[in-house]
Amino acid sequence: MSEDLNQDNITPTEEPVQSTEEIKKEFQGLLGSIKKFLSELLDIRTNTDQEATKEAIIADIPFKGHTSWILICSIFIASVGLNANSTAVVIGAMLISPLMGPILGLGMSLAINDIDTLRRSLKNFTVMVVLSVLTAFLFFYLFPLRDESSELLARTAPDIRDVLIAFFGGLALVIARAKKGTIASVIFGVAIATALMPPLCTVGFGLAIGNYNYAAGAMYLFIINTIFIALATFLVLKLLRFPMVRYANSKRRRLIGRVASGLAILVMIPASLTFWDALQESLFRKQARQFVEEKIAPYKFSGSGRFMEDFTDIEFNKGEGAVIELVFMGNETIPESVIATWKAQKDEDENFKRLRNADLQIIQGSQGEQGDQLKYVEELYQSQKNQLLGKDEKIRLLESELKRLNKLNARQIPFQDISAEAQTNYENLEYLAFSNAIRTDFKKLDTVSVFEAKWKRDARRVDIVKDAKKLHNWLKVRLKDSTILLTEIIQD
């Protein structure tokens, strides 16, 4: 019996705990599996045809004969598309354009230390740019329709997104080129995304109309695309370990290697600076828009004031030249205390630290300045109409504002002239007064112009009645307003 009890009290043996070494081995095995999976997923070296890639890039570098005529035709097509504001036509022109060849040649020659290919690429690249700009210039100079379309203007102000598009487009292009059996769809897609041709067409347009700011902005965009496509080519071919070109003369080989390395560094320096500048501008504009949305737009007007948010102008300049211009219209002005608060928030809020050196400019109208408001909005329309092309909502908003101000301006009374003419024509008139009054028939409100006439005490009543009638009719004709009222001050 006691033996049975002892057997019942025996506990089963516990499973041995895994040692630290075993856990470490399993973890290393897991990491190895993940590394192998990622290597198989992302490795592009095993399926790269180096010789075919080099031959394909070198074959696309020459720029003469058929290639030149294809470029000229594609430039004409792109120019027509930009002029007509047709995105589809511009895309079609980019698909047939041979602009990419010399740029890939530049990147490859720097990567493999090939000075002869570099020389040919630079020569053909220069010819390509000059021929493209000249063709676009002649088209826009001779073509009678030269509207500043939104497609054209979109190529005059590059930003951080253009840098990223050019770099990753260049990466995709050279990776597709390096693969055995080139992926044609990638090449076509990159040709559209990086958009080398439209900026060159815009340069020709800017030169044709004499707007050198347009030309400079578009050329800057083209240079960004060129540098970052070449840089992407350089980096990918280095990663794929394309063999360096060997020269029989070791001294010459070292010299060429140094030259190629120096040029590669020179390409990277402006590329890095361009990326940094574009990033700073992008961050500045983001904070400026956030500031307007959070601090300016919520402001409540007690009267008929209006914040013209669509006409907010944000200008970024390195240093202290940045400007945020805000436009307010209507018969209510922003109190100075509110403007001071906005400026303090801009300068002191950590969320807007990039705006501290920016100049906050407030442009606003007032009830007694309808004529000035009209003039300003008309000037604003002229200056902004090119940027408003294709933006129907903004155009409708601006037209409605012009209508409102035209109505106000039409009711402006040149009282000084009117009073001088009335004094000359009516010798019994002692003085004339003017004011606006609100009248209602209990169905709607209307604003009418009211003149008040006081006649000389010694004038005969019959003459006063006759002159008052003539004065009233004259005011209606003179001011082209049949609703004008004339009241008479009764003498004591």
Image (spheres, rainbow, N blue to C red):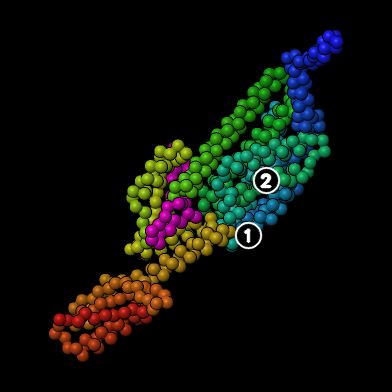
Picture coordinates of residue 457, whole percent (x, y): 15, 82
Vertical placement of residue 22 versus 334, above or below? above
Residue at 76%, 27% (x, y): give it: 34
In this view, the residue farthest toward the bottom is: 462
Check disc 2 and report the residue beneath it: 193
The residues colored magenta run 297-325
Q: Foreground residue, 332 or 465?
A: 332
Mark 1 sits on what residue? 84
The residue lying furthest to the left in this view is 458
Three-letter amino acid code at disc 1? Ala
Q: CA distance from mark 1 to mark 2?
A: 20 Å
Is residue 169 shown left or right of residue 158? right
Comparing 463 with 156, the one in front is 463
Question: Of the residues under marks 1 and 2, which one precedes in the sequence?
Answer: 1
Q: Quadrant of residue 229?
A: top right
Overall secondary structure of the magenta section: loop
Answer whether residue 447 is visible to the viewer in this image: yes
Q: How many residues crowd around disc 2 within 10 Å: few (fewer than 14), some, or many (20 or more)?
A: some
Quadrant for the N terminus, please.
top right
- Residue at 19% x, 81% y: name it: 490
Q: Residue at x 16, y 86 (%)?
A: 459
| Left or right relative to 184: residue 196 | left
Q: Is residue 9 magenta?
A: no
Furthest residue toward front: 1
Q: In the image, 384: left or right of 428?
A: right
Residue shown at the point (25%, 74%) measured from the top left: 433
Dot 1: few (<14), some (14–19), or many (≥20) neighbours within 10 Å? some
